[in-house]
Amino acid sequence: MRYGPFTAALLLGVSLVAGASPAHAQVNVGDRAPDFVLPAATRDTILQSGVRLSDILGKGNIILAFYPADWSGGCTTEMCTIRDNFAELGSLNARVLGISGDYVFSHRAWARELELPFMLLSDHDHSVAKTYQSYNPERGLNKRTVFLLDRNGNIAYRDLEYTVKTPDSFMKLRNALTAIQ
């Protein structure tokens, strides 16, 4: 079917608006970590006012652990691995922020159930995940990725293919953290 120039331009515009996601620049090692504010929960508290990344920079290294969903098998494995190694990560001057699209109420219940000693942030519209190349539009969920920020707020390490199937991804993260001490 042939369309006139006006109809073709209109259809192109509609398809771009309907199917396009915002273009985000690649976030690379060495770049300043993009700032954000997200509601957060611990096993005891909900912070609807949120946590601003720039407010906690300069107080140590930060691990941003993006994951698809609370209560799922792979995510439980990932967060429990971090929990079980939390003391060691702390001794390497690291603070952990888990980030998914789940609401803070789910985060608090899940953190209680798993006894997680770190914050879980709610990125319900996935805007932060998109900024950090950690969103899977086909599934509508975050991808499993990890970013390590140094105490200056620069990205020191990233793993866009983080896996919980073997301990390799966690070992690489721990080695990267050790290297920036």
Image (tube, helix red, strand yellow):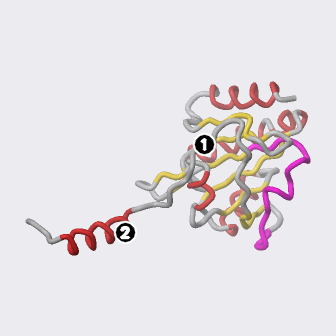
Find residue 106 and report its horizontal and vertical position in percent: 66, 65
Find residue 88 and report its horizontal and vertical position in percent: 85, 33
The amino acid at mark 1 is: Thr
Distance between mark 2 and mark 1 Cα atoms: 27 Å
The amino acid at mark 2 is: Ala
Q: Quadrant of residue 50?
A: bottom right
Q: Residues within 10 Å of mark 1 (few under 14, many from 20)?
A: many
25 over 176 or under it: above or below: below
Q: Please tell me which residue lies in front, 57 or 71.
A: 57
Residue bounds of the magenta highlight: 46-63
Identity of the residue drawn at 72% across and 64% down: 38
Q: Quadrant of residue 172?
A: top right
Q: Which residue is mark 2?
A: 18
Split into 4 quadrants, where in the image is the C terminus? Answer: top right
Find residue 147 and report its horizontal and vertical position in percent: 69, 41
Q: Please tell me which residue lies in front, 26 or 101.
A: 26
